[in-house]
Amino acid sequence: MRAWWWLWSRCPGIGAARMRMLEAVAVEHGVGLEDLWTWPIDRLQRALAWPNSLVQQVDYFRRISGAAPDLNVPGDVILPGDPSWPVLLNELQRPPLALFHRGRSELLAVIAQQRCVAVVGTRSASPHGLHAAAELSSALALAGWPVLSGLAEGIDAAALRACLNAGGSPIAVLGTPLNRAYPSHHRRLQAAIGEKGLLLTEQAHAAPVRRGHFAARNRLLVALSCAVVVVECPERSGALITARCAVEQQCPVWVVPGDAGRGSARGSNALLLDKAAPLLSPQQLIHHLGEGPLPSQSPVVSVRTEWSHSDQRLLEALEHGASLEELSRVLNRPSARLAKDLLALELQGRVLCESGHRWRPIPG
């Protein structure tokens, strides 16, 4: 049954609603999905009442799959009914057909039990927002709570990077296949999370990257979390979609209050008027949640005390942001050496590579 679900789910045009129709037809006729695979095209069309174009697509997929279709489910796939499948996904209006994962497989049990905290916010974050996301995520990691986010620019990346640097277990829900990184300059961060934490996506390896996939992942962030924290977002933001999904799924929403009048916090501040809980400190949330599902981490020594004179000069040159070429010119250092230094500081959570390959320091 599991293998045939996997095969049908790969058919073009088959989504959650049509998979439910297939299962209903199978039950009605007292057969399995494997039997429906062999039904003549006209019988399928009569039973399902699908558009002719869709039935033709399914028939073409069956024919190219051959008489003995590949029923092997890859090891990086979890499907509905698997022990590690988060059952709350089934309650979504549009549940995923499969989840693809890379990283520490023991974290699959954590998401199946909704034992992680989603930290989300705007791509165009203020220094205050970035600092708040990093401070919260570090504290959660030290308390044994996995931090889950979307790996977008800004708040998402700051939260996941801080969790990683604190020795925690970051979980990134991607809007792309596992073998793609968006934005591309997050490739190193994505790889590090794939080693120390967990990467998740509903997009198959060959799936194209589409804008709608990034909005669609918001429902997964909520379904896998026991709480959602909106750090900072404007009035039009994907983080507000996540907050709305959380309210619909009765998942608690917390908001880090921002300065009145700051455009990047207008959307998150407005959530406070909708009875979201204000989050005034990381300890407030940790006290509310209780003990995390993972062992608590020992506090790490701040790398600020370990900066070399060379690093300090580099950070000073980055005060207002700069490209690798600009830094090389100002500091009179080879670009190759600077790239290595910047990578080390990025992994320590002290600098951020933005779109256009410009670097800037992370406040904190």
Image (cartoon, rainbow, N blue to C red):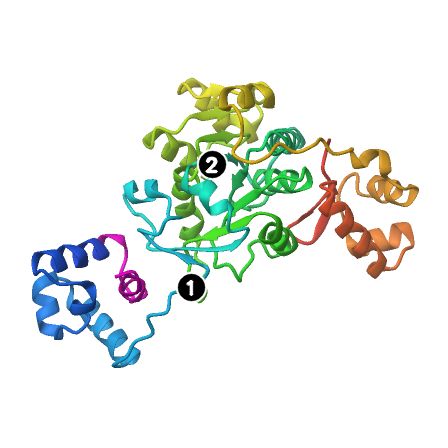
In the figure, residue 299 lies in which quadrant? top right
Image coordinates of residue 214 in percent, x first then y, are 45, 49
In the figure, residue 294 lies in which quadrant? top right
Q: Nearer the viewer, residue 22 or 181?
A: 22
The relative height of residue 110 versus residue 48 in the rendered view (above or below) is above
Mark 1, Cα crowd under 10 Å, few <14 / some 14-19 / many 20+, is: few
Residue bearing the label numbered 1: 207
The relative height of residue 357 versus residue 305 in the rendered view (above or below) is below
The relative height of residue 150 versus residue 3 in the rendered view (above or below) is above
Residue bearing the label numbered 2: 239
Residue 167 appears left or right of 271: right
Of the 4 image quadrants, the one containing the N terminus is: bottom left
Q: Which residues are magenta?
A: 1-17
- Magenta-drawn stretch contains 15: yes
Helix or strand or loop: what does disc 2 sit on? helix
Amino acid type indicated by mark 1? Ala
Helix or strand or loop: what does disc 1 sit on? loop
Residue 352 appears left or right of 282: right
Question: Would you say residue 259 is visible in this rendering?
Answer: no
Image coordinates of residue 188 in percent, x first then y, are 65, 55
Mark 2, Cα crowd under 10 Å, few <14 / some 14-19 / many 20+, is: many
The Cα atoms of the two marked residues, 1 and 2, are separated by 24 Å
Amino acid type indicated by mark 2? Ala
Q: Residue at x 21, y 74 (%)?
A: 59
